Structure formats: structure tokens, C-alpha cells
Image (spheres, helix red, strand yellow):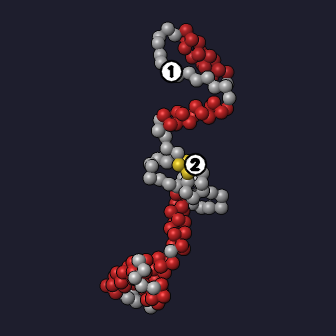
Amino acid sequence: SEDIADWLAAKVDNAIHDDTTSWFRAYEIASFSDYLLLQVSLLTEKKVIIKRCKNCGRYFMPEKTSIDYCQRILPGETQSCYEIGPKRVFNKLLAADLPRNLYSKAYKKYQARLRRKVITEDEFNTWRENAKVYLDNVQHGLISMEEYTEWMQK
């Protein structure tokens, strides 16, 4: 608008004719690549962290260095990468680790039995401790996968 243009022109005129000393940086930018280089240099100077989202692969600036997922909601999704990313990584790891996958399925089965009061909490805790021992044993090669699978399916 005309009011803003007049205000801006007055500010520029005052700055030109102001005799006070002030410090500022001036950058001469001749191309878009110069502009990008300047931006990267300023981000580096201010120690801004830029990470790549472990779910969607896009870059973002996390609030904390420990954050690995952005807040974007991808097309076709109802939750952000921050909400669904860790679940997907866990599920991928679970799928790749057959003993842990069997443990997870059995754990859910026993937990459902506990909720329905088919077993007591003591029975559940006893099973869980034994299952952890079996899981550790199969992962360290002390028992075979067949023995482990047979025990988990009981």
C-alpha cells in the first residue's frame, strides 16, 4: 500500500542521513548460488542443526538433537512422522529378528490372558521372566531356534 511505501521511504531516508555509527554486515550476492552459500554459512555460524527425517527422508530443524523425525504429515497418513516413525522402525526390527518377533507375539497373547483373568499376575510374571531367559539363550546360541519356537508356542 501507499502508506507502507511512504513509511519505508522515510525509514530509508532517515537511515541514509543518520550520522550515528552502527555495525552491520553487508553481503554482495551476485547469484542464487551465492545466496545459498550465504544461508548455509549463517546456519553454520549459528550452529543450527539440520537432520534428515528417518521416516520420510526430508530435511528438518529439530528442537533437540535427540529428535530423529519431523512433524510433517505425509499424504495418505493421519499422523506425523514423529508419531509413526518410531513404530515403523520397531516393526522393521521386529520383522528382521525372528526370536524377538515370536517373543512379542507370545507376550501379547499372555497379556491378553492376564486381562481376561485366565491367568494370574504371578503366572504372567513367571512366564515373562522365563521367556526373557529363553530369548536371551536363543540369541546367544545356547538353544536352537526349534527349541525356542516350541517353548514359545506352549
State the quadrant of the C terminus. Answer: bottom left
On the image, the x and y values in percent for residue 72 come to 58, 53
Q: Which of these two is toward me, 147 or 51? A: 147
* Mark found first going from the N terminus, 1 or 2: 1
* Image quadrant assignment for residue 34: top right
Q: Which of these two is toward me, 104 or 93? A: 93
On the image, the x and y values in percent for residue 43 come to 52, 36
| SS type, badge 2 | strand
On the image, the x and y values in percent for residue 137 come to 39, 80
Side of 93 where 128 appears, left or right: left
Side of 120 where 150 appears, left or right: right
Q: Which of these two is toward me, 22 or 77? A: 22
In the rendered image, the vertical position of residue 39 relative to residue 147, given as above or below: above
The circle on residue 24 is 1
On the image, the x and y values in percent for residue 84 come to 54, 62
**Do the residues bearing badges 1 and 2 touch, measured as CB atoms within 8 Å?**
no
Q: Which residue is identified by label 2?
A: 59
Using the rendered image of the protein, determine whether residue 135 is visible from the camera's viewpoint.
no
Residue type at numbered disc 1: Phe
The circle on residue 8 is none
Residues under labels 1 and 2: Cα distance?
Answer: 30 Å
Number of other residues with Cα within 10 Å of mark 2, as a class: few under 14, some 14 to 19, many 20 or more: few
